[in-house]
Image: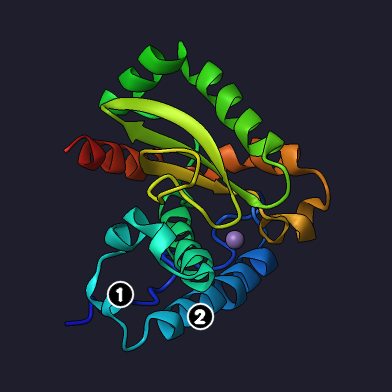
């Protein structure tokens, strides 16, 4: 029985994250890039046994699958997560247990932001920066291309609860080569409530 992978609606308008992420970038990112990953992923798994698996099950044994499944399945999953952790009402500070865990893991929220921003800024070429839960603790890491910490062989392990797309397609129209400025502005749209919910869920 197919898991019925879905191309979900963006949870806000293309201009919702202005001025930090511009509407034209959001529109192209969602309708072209994200759509492309989804269409290629579903085409790659069509009428194979992978249709019966969850994304997590596919990622867990990634080395068994094709580069097309890896790149497009990763692209589909990563962007779904990315849209879900941003909001027009974002920014500010995390709260609750997540705030306590960030203080415990990194010293303070500001120190966490430095570690995360550094991971995002220094990822060479295209990829993602992540905040993950690994064995009950928070960790920051980055991955190449459309890999993520759920994937076998990604070089970073855990359950991702926050991800930042640092592919040029995510920022080039507005920021050109100024990736650090994109990262700095992005904190204004992070939906800490959504990240907190993912944190609770990841702890199990
Ligand atoms: Mn992207």
**Where 30 falls versus 82 (above or below)?**
below
Pointer 2 residue: 40
For image coordinates 44% across by 35% down, the residue present is 131
Inter-mark Cα distance, 1 to 2: 14 Å
Circle 1 Cα neighbour tier, 10 Å, few/some/many (<14 / 14–19 / ≥20): some
Q: Is residue 92 visible?
A: no
Q: Quadrant of residue 179?
A: top right
Q: Is residue 90 left or right of residue 193?
A: right
Residue 195 image offset from top left, x and y in percent: 36, 41
* Nearer to the camera, 155 or 72: 155
Q: Is residue 134 left or right of residue 21?
A: left
**Where 62 falls versus 76 (above or below)?**
above
Pointer 1 residue: 50
**Where 77 falls versus 66 (above or below)?**
above
Q: Is residue 189 left or right of residue 159?
A: right
First of labels 1, 2 by sequence position: 2
- Which residue is most to the right? 177
- Which residue is most to the front? 64
* Nearer to the camera, 94 or 81: 81
Residue 107 image offset from top left, x and y in percent: 46, 10
Residue 197 image offset from top left, x and y in percent: 27, 42
């Amino acid at each position: 029985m197919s898991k019925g992978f879905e191309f979900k609606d963006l949870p806000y308008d293309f201009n919702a994250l202005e001025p930090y992420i511009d509407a034209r970038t959001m529109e192209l990112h969602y309708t072209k890039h994200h759509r492309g990953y989804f269409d290629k992923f579903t085409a790659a798994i069509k009428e194979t046994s992978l249709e019966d698996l969850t994304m997590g099950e596919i990622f867990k044994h990634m080395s068994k699958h094709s580069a097309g499944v890896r790149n497009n399945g990763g692209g589909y999953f990563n962007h779904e997560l990315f849209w879900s952790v941003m909001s027009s009402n974002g920014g500010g500070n995390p709260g609750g247990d997540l705030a306590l865990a960030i203080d415990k893991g990194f010293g303070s929220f500001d120190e966490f932001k430095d570690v995360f921003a550094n991971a995002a800024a220094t990822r060479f070429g295209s990829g993602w920066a992540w905040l993950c839960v690994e064995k009950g603790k928070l960790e920051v890491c980055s991955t190449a291309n459309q890999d993520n910490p759920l994937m076998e062989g990604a070089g970073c392990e855990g359950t991702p609860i926050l991800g930042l797309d640092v592919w040029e397609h995510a920022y080039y129209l507005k920021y050109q080569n100024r990736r650090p400025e994109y990262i700095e502005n992005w904190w204004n749209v992070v939906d800490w409530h959504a990240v907190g919910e993912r944190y609770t869920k990841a702890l199990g």
